[in-house]
Amino acid sequence: MKLKSKIEKIHLNSVQRVSEKPKLLNFHMSFRFDKTKPEDFGLIYSKQENLIIDPKDGSQWIKRHLIDLGWGLEVAFCRLPYPTFDELLVMSIYSNSNNKSADFYCALGILINDYSLRFLDFTERLFDSNHDLHKYIGFYQIVKTQIHHHDETINKRWQVFFERVNCLM
């Protein structure tokens, strides 16, 4: 089996498996710093430090700063446990590119911040597998605005990747 078809099969299976799960609200996020407190989303602080509760279902949440939409890092509230790596991919790169929701931006923020090397490896494999990358250019233009990694090697690899993407445009 060719590399391209192996990667396509893995990702199609991941997308199908994840899309069969019931849809949960995984994130709340401010846009333009308009909502920054748990109460703005119907959440409340718990007695445990840094833990927030949804009183409707008892789910646990934490506050994070994940993504910069142009005026600083936005406040986000993330349901615990976080979605898996594959679920985050479905919410971001495989989502409807016209639907820039809190799930889209927060999933992207977690991929960049918490899975930086794994997300970069995935991205490079996707590019090298000769996928139709034109459908991902808009997504990677957003990614490019968010990459500010403390590891210079990872930054350099992203820079090389974005140079390759620019050749497609």
Image (spheres, rainbow, N blue to C red):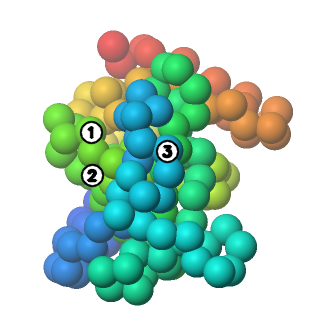
Count of picture labels = 3
Amino acid on which the number 1 mark rests in the picture: Lys
Q: Secondary structure at mark 2?
A: loop
Is residue 94 found left or right of 53 in the rendered image? left
Q: Secondary structure at mark 3?
A: loop
136 vs 8, nearest the viewer: 136
Residue located beneath label 3 in the image: 36
Amino acid on which the number 2 mark rests in the picture: Tyr
10 in relation to 163, above or below: below
Task: Name which of mark 1 and mark 3 comes first in the sequence.
Answer: 3
The x and y percentages for residue 96 are 18, 45
Q: Nearer the viewer, mark 1 or mark 2?
A: 1
Residue at the spot x=59%, y=53% of the render? 64
Is residue 128 found left or right of 150 in the rendered image? left
**Spatial distance from mark 1 to mark 3, Cα to Cα?**
19 Å
Amino acid on which the number 3 mark rests in the picture: Thr
Please rate how many residues cluster around mark 3, counting C-alpha atoms within 10 Å: few if below 14, some from 14 to 19, many from 20: some
The x and y percentages for residue 116 are 64, 50
Q: Quadrant of residue 27?
A: bottom left
76 vs 41, nearest the viewer: 41
Residue located beneath label 2 in the image: 94
Residue at the spot x=40%, y=34% of the render? 34
**Spatial distance from mark 3 to mark 2, Cα to Cα?**
28 Å
